[in-house]
Amino acid sequence: MSNFEHHIEVHNLSTWFGKKHILKDITCYFKDNTITAIMGPSGCGKSTLLRSLNRLNDLVPSFRHTGIVLFRGEDIYGPGFSVYDLRTHIGMVFQKPNPFPMSVRDNITYGPKLHGTKDEDELEKIVETSLKKAALWDEVKDDLDHPAPNLSGGQQQRLCIARALSVDPPVLLMDEPVSALDPISATKIEELIVELKNDYTIILVTHNVQQAFRVSDQSAFLYLGELVEFDETKRILEAPTDSRTEAFITGRIG
Amino acid sequence: MTEESSSNPLNQIAVKITQSLKQFKDSDKPGRIDSLGRFGLFIPALASTLIIILILAFLWFESVPIFIDPVGGPGIIVSPTWDPNRDLYGIGIFIVGSLICTGIAIGLAVPLGIGGAIFLSEFCPMQLRQPIKMIIEMMAAIPSIVYGLWAYIVLVPIIKYNIAPLANSTTNGLSVLAGGIILAIMLLPTIVTISNDALQTVPMSLREASLALGATQSETSRKIVLSAALPGVGAAVVLSLGRAVGETMAVLMVTGNSLQIPYSLFDPTYVMTSIITNQLGYAFVFPLWRSALFAVGLVLLIMSMCFTITAKLFIRWGMKTRGYI
């Protein structure tokens, strides 16, 4: 494997959906074992940037891109790079909780089973560790065979985090993971994200400046597809250098 | 002023109209009109349940003579000999024939139909999906007798000259296999369209979650999309089951209508719907014969009800384990 400084680096990335130019010449990197927040008003391309990192944008037939995204020093859009391999190393949590319509246990074992884990004891262990990491174990350990959609919204989202952790990816992408939840569940998940930082590189899309401030170490501020600022969160929020960032932080745009 | 307006015939009509409109709007409020409406809607709901009970009762009433007569009795259900001239009314052949034909049809149509639905919903390019769906829906509109005619001149010879020799067997082509295949073709549009609709209602976010875990598109469609849509796909199978057991014309034309238990796929047989259609005309003056044919109808109805109930229970179980209900 080639040398690399960060798990994920983005160089001069531009993307289009059809003729619509979404991301404009983005260059940034995501430090290991930190939380990077991607902030910006609606429609600025936050989610598109996130989905470019695990190639989920490829599902849209009209998607085009220029530039390079490196994962461990390799171009993920390069020829011969396995997108399935990439996605087992980069987990993702979505905006709305989307547990599979099956039991809690099957939700967690789905990923490991896909990648060839057959041993029942090992799967059992994965279920327990993943749920413990997602702070859900104590609530569901007696109901592992109950259908996952019967859980509460907050529990469902933590289950989705546990599901993403089940294949042990070094990087976790989170697309506004708490915006669809009630405040108490949201706080719980925020705390969880900070805890997960020790073992994972987390990239968090958020609409919410306070959340970015509480949770993240570094931040990228996107505006209309351009990367306006990219630095430590504290620095950006305390002394924004760009007037657009300031306007967003103070609530004048967004 | 008021006197003038009330005496004006045009105004009187206007008042009448606004009054009845007001009454119509008020009919939503609890009261006599409301309860009248509720009672009025109760009647069609009751009628549809009553109809099935009445049909069952009527079939039972007509088939009682053969079940209590010494030459018949309940044993006719398992007896294989049907010969009204000798007062032998065994209907076992027809039950076996129908079950085998339905089995072949379901065995062919369900995997093919679900496969087609998965292709349409998950892999088919957008521009092709609508045209293909339209053609498949048109297939459902073809009358069954036309399917029968086609099978008689195309499918039956193919079985006679091309398929049977492969199995070192001789047949004139009129066989359970022909009946099963033509039934399968007739069931396909139902299964494909209903399953496709069920697959399309599975949220995109589930597909994304699966792909984001490193699953391929084929793993996603088999293990997530199909599994999530299984209750809907099950409904498609239930509908087609009912149709397969009850289908008459096409099957009658290609199964050979021979009074024997089929021991191979190429043997002819006689199905329940065919015997009723073929013999009811002659049987009407012979009470026992007639009653035996009604008994066939009764068994057919009970069979298809059992299929439907079993399948419904299965679907309910599927929905429970998926957390839909």
Image (spheres, grey):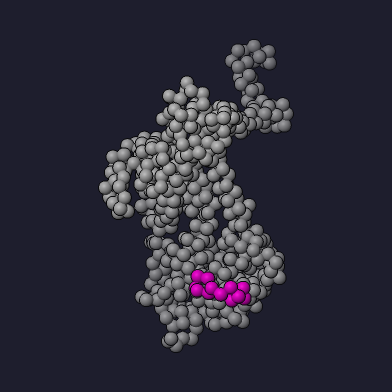
Q: Is residue A53 visible?
A: no
* Front-most of residues A7 and B307: B307
Q: Does the magenta stretch include residue A115?
A: yes
Magenta region, residue range: A113-125
Where in the figure is residue B189, as x and y percent of width and height? Answer: 41, 45
Q: A188 left or right of B318?
A: right
Q: Residue at x 66, y 25 (%)?
A: B23
Residue lying at the far bottom in this picture: please name it: A3
Q: In which quarter of the image is the N terminus of chain B?
A: top right
Q: Which residue is drawn at 73% across and 29% down?
A: B31
Q: With respect to residue A92, does B270 lie above or below?
A: above
Q: Which residue is drawn at 39% across and 62% down?
A: A62
Where in the figure is residue A236, as x and y percent of width and height? Answer: 58, 77
* Front-most of residues B206 and B228: B228
* Front-most of residues B186 and B105: B105
Most prominent secondary structure in the magenta stretch?
Answer: helix
The image quarter containing residue B57 is top right
Q: Does the magenta stretch include residue B254?
A: no
Where in the figure is residue B67, as x and y percent of width and height? Answer: 57, 31
Where in the figure is residue B108, as x and y percent of width and height? Answer: 41, 51
Q: A6 left or right of B127?
A: right
* Front-most of residues B102 and A55: B102
Q: Is residue B1 visible?
A: yes
Residue lying at the far left in this picture: please name it: B161
Count of numbered circles on the image: 0
Residue lying at the far right in this picture: please name it: B31
The image quarter containing residue B268 is top left
Q: With respect to residue A20, does B95 lie above or below?
A: above
Q: Which residue is drawn at 40% across and 64% down?
A: A63
